[in-house]
Image: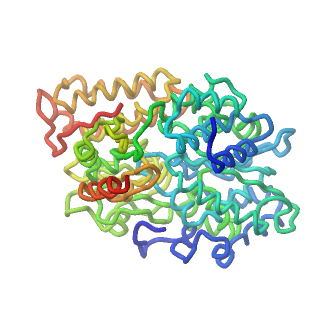
Amino acid sequence: MLYNEPSPLEVKIVTKRFGLPNSASLDTYLANDGFKAFFKAIEMTPEQIIDEVKVSALRGRGGAGFPAGLKWSFVPRTSPKPKYVIVNADESEPGTCKDRLLMENDPQQLIEGILIAGRAIDAHKGYIYIRGEYRYLIDVMDRAIAEAYSRGYLGKNIQGTGFDFDIYTHTGAGAYECGEETALLDSIEGKRGIPRMKPPFPAVSGAWQSPTLLNNVETLSAVPPIIRDGGAAFAALGTPKNGGTRMVCLSGHINKPGVYELPVGFNLLRMIYEVGGGMRNGKKLKAVVPGGSSCPLLTADECDIAMDFDSLAKAKSMLGSGGTVILDENTCMVKFALRIMKFYAHESCGWCIPCREGTTWLKKMLQRMHDGGGQKSDIPLIGELSKNMLGRTFCALGDAAAMPTISIVEKFPEDFEAHLNGHPCPYEHSHEAVLV
Amino acid sequence: MTFSPELEAKFAKLLETYPPGRTRSAVIPMLLFAQDEVGHISNELIEEVAKRCKVTPLQVDEVVGYYSMLHRKPMGKYHVQVCTNISCLLTGGEELYHHAEKTLGIGNKEVTADGQFSLEEVECIGACSWAPAVQINYEFHHQVTAERLDQLVGELRKRQ
């Protein structure tokens, strides 16, 4: 099912079967290039497959943007223990809603991507870790997996190639932290999702102390088109070192919110005004969250930018997970920072003190500021406290809470000043919800 | 404890899903699937899952305390979850949450006296481009207005 009208500016690679009748069925998949890449991969050596993914300049679509081919090459060639492919379908970065569509509309593409990854690292089992809130997708994926087994595309000796592979689904139960790959590993082992010390990296010792390749749904869904049409063709769609397309989730104060597949490096202003139909109610653009709530915000003046990993890094932000949230001139940035911090305080697993205590204190300070009880010295203090969290935690959740906060305090100090001296919030929002 | 044959089949499949000796991996899915059937996670259920997964009850209980979808107390038959995270915040999710409080007459994580409804303000549920979003049990509702929420609740009230 599709939830928004496609845009003519889209370049459909991973979403090319979206909208076809029964797009989730194996028959539709086979009639539209399905499993061609798998048969090609079977004829290739593992090294050739990994090289092709390297050539494609595919970078992790979960948020970190790590080069996928490089990640695959870290898995040791030989191992006395079995190896695993784990799909990170714990999509929970605020602003992000794309992996959901990939599984719902084209589950067979994900299955084929897992098979090719398995062939490349010599794994024979894969797990799809799906967040608990996406329960219907457990059913969708289980049905697709059962269909693939029944037609010989999973199981023993797949299509007579001699390659064996099994795929299982696994459900989470509500924890943002489990999207972090080592916390996900603890979670799949039946424990609280708490990040692990690295090294060892999951490629060497991951699930059940075995070599494990973890990739996001969109990353693995891009693998069949890369192997089928060649890495170079995929790379050419994007900008240097930023291959292919990416699913952009536009949300917020925009006329046509939706998920659109656009070349990596697409200009952000064009995303807002041409793909997204411009600002809602003709309001002025104030800020953009480029790729999920962990990313430093861009001011309206910074939005004439190519949306690729390197351009965003140069602008001291991140491309992140593709959740592009558009804020108009009526948005209270104190309120926005508060809501982000409430989220991280709620989701901090509590393992690292700077994150556990820092997010809670920052939430309290931002709440007091928004309620009109802040002091002028609180404004730099919020930034300072956030900076003290940077790089001082096992995983990136502490950084993810600090980075947007630092950017908001530095780029929108006037919004904080407007709340001082007992002044009520100058913007419309007056209610305050309680999140326990 | 006794469960439906469907749930027993799910449990049997779960114990086959993970590598040999790794039955602890089945704890979280087993808890969530069981909760769907029996309503909440009781001490008895913790003991049962511990026995089946060959772990201690404490190892199960610590997991229950961590994951936000696992409930130690019964929730309503219809668990209304309103997202107020950033994309929903910008499109009226918070106002919608307050409206839900009024419509249902309960606050966050509370249950109506008849046990039919519970309410929760939730973090991002992955419907950002179709905000504001609500999930009732596992069903998604997109671009929900106050009127639409009342209509959904009204339909469920009739269904009781």
Query: Where is residue A99 drawn, in percent x and y?
Result: 53, 56
Q: Which residue occupies 69% across, 49% down? A: B9
Residue A24 left/right relative to A383: right
Residue B99 left/right relative to B127: left
- Picture quadrant of residue B52: top right
Q: How is the image coloured?
A: rainbow
Residue A267 left/right relative to A76: left
Return the residue nearer the eye: A315 or A23: A23
Query: Where is residue A120 drawn, in percent x and y?
Result: 77, 55
Return the residue nearer the eye: A106 or B67: B67
Up/down of B127 relative to A174, above or below: below
- Picture quadrant of residue B142: bottom left
User: Do we see residue B121 in this rendering?
Assistant: no
Query: Where is residue A354 drawn, in percent x and y?
Result: 45, 22
Q: Which residue occupies 37% across, 44% down? A: B116
- Picture quadrant of residue B120: top left
User: Do we see residue B25 in this rendering?
Assistant: yes
Up/down of A230 relative to A119, above or below: below
Return the residue nearer the eye: A18 or B54: B54
Quarter of the picture containing the C terminus of chain A is: top left
Query: Where is residue A171 drawn, in percent x and y?
Result: 59, 45
Total marks shown come to 0
Up/down of A111 relative to A334, above or below: below
